[in-house]
Image: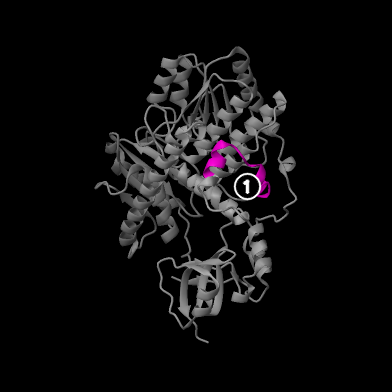
Amino acid sequence: MVRWKLPDDEQADFLTQLQKSRPKIDLDLTLTLDDLPDEGLFANIGILADRIQRAMYTNEPLVIFGHDDPDGLTGTYILHQFFDSIGYQKHEFYIPNRTLYPHGIQDDFVEYVRQNAFTLAIVVDNGISSREGVERLKELGCDTLIVDHHLIQPDLLPDAYGIMNPRLADCRYPFKDLAGVGVALMLIRYLGRLLEHEVDESAYFWTAVGSIADKVPMVGLNRLILRHVIDNWPRMRDASIEFLMRNFKRVSDDMDVFDFITNTSRLIANGREEGGQHLAMRFLLQMGDEKAELFQELEREKKQWESELNRIFGYLDTILADFEARAFIYFDDEDVIPYNFLGTASTYVVSSLNIPAIMIKYHNGNMVCEGRCPEGMNMVDAFAHCKEHLIQYGGHAKAAGFSMRPENYDDFLSCYNDYLDHNLQEIEPVPRFEVDAVIRLEELHHANWLFMQMLLPFGMQNPEPLLLARNVDVNTLMAKFTLEYNNISLPRGEKIDMVFYWRSRQSVRVMDFVRSRA
């Protein structure tokens, strides 16, 4: 494996190298929310808006059903807060626990709707393949509005009252890569126009949190929304943001704002409960003294999650050390990897080996799978190829999942390998580190730091720049910067070539180094 891949023209100045490394990034920071396309271009948005307004005017009981990840959680939250702000109080939330139930509309939610006599359900960040679930809600007299962003599978598309998804064939909204919360934001912007009610600025912050967590591309409108939050940070305030800021380091520049968004997304990824409740959602909605207790519990769960993640990564490292194959297929028959970590584990394999990875295990009497893949393959297409063996499947091109009866395991593997035989393109080995720009230590000054921050937000299609500095004196480096070592030890008193992330004006995270030849 090639250790480092260098820029095509490392003799160019720092700014030119960075700009060439991310051609999809528009550095025009004069764009504002006024430059967003008209939400009316969304297919069916008028149908959704009319049905919601009818529910408001007749005081119908409404439930917001959100997927239990930060994307679905934040989408549910901004809808809930918007309804509160316009004076519509007869609404509740329901967040399913995916360690107990599969993705989509399942028995637990249908029963909750029946018991509470809801006549309208807004399904956020899921539901686009819940054909049976929508039919069961319809039998109860409950209309379903789906607000989603996952890939469309025509044979699974439910007969909902209305569907809002930028990937629908007849949707004219030009940007297709919004997160689920991004689609929810466009719905409340549209409703806000109709009702002459301004959307609170905090909705953009929570959209940023959900978008970062869901790893949607940080280009186009996703970038515009995130830049709005960063550039207008003093206006991003609600009770939860204020509380979290008191428990975060001082926010002094754009990178601090981005780190705060990222940290918040990791915090609210925890908190799954039973009965449609969710600790993170209760924290967001809580206005009293209990908010601090809920925060402490979320922090405790976050630390447990991080510890478990480190254990899983260490286990995978032992498996991947000498692994050589075109794809990675892992059946967790010894229950080493918890169900809610399957997707993260698959992502880790893809980032390590640059090959498709699927993780399968037993769960609630069936088998479940999370798959991830690099460029050159579509995971949803792979699962669609084998749909006769699956109970349900869905997701994104690079991240998808399914459930399956155990007796279909062998047939699925045969079918999946058949798909790989006919569709898996030859994937080039990736270098261990792909350098965005070569820079001298003395160029890590204020002006270049300001330019680095113009590249924010970092994410898919706009990764945090990885830099290379040559012939660096380690003693000088340690005297000038606060260092994060990434589990490596630097040779004091020697000169090195190092690849690193410039994490703040006065700190760097060293990722790799070699001793300098010069």
Residue 90 falls in image quadrant: top right
Please, which residue is most extreme toward the bottom here? 518
**Secondary structure beneath label 1:** helix
Identify which residue, 170 or 192, lies in the foreground. 192
Please, which residue is most extreme toward the front here? 289
Q: In screen coordinates, is 263 left or right of 44?
A: left
Q: Residue at x 43, y 57 (%)?
A: 355
**Amino acid on which the number 1 mark rests in the picture:** Leu
Q: Which residues are magenta?
A: 224-244
Q: Taking 210 as reference, is 163 above or below it? A: above
Identify which residue, 129 or 412, lies in the foreground. 129
Identify which residue, 297 or 351, lies in the foreground. 297
Q: Residue at x 30, y 41 (%)?
A: 409
* Residue 445 x %, y %: 64, 70
Q: In screen coordinates, is 445 left or right of 351?
A: right
Tag 1: Cα neighbours inside 10 Å, few (<14), some, or many (≥20)?
many
Q: Tell me which secondary structure the magenta stretch mostly adopts.
A: helix
* Residue 206 x %, y %: 57, 40
* Residue 319 x %, y %: 31, 59
Q: Is residue 387 magenta?
A: no
Residue annotated with mark 1: 226
Whether residue 260 appears in this view of the structure is yes
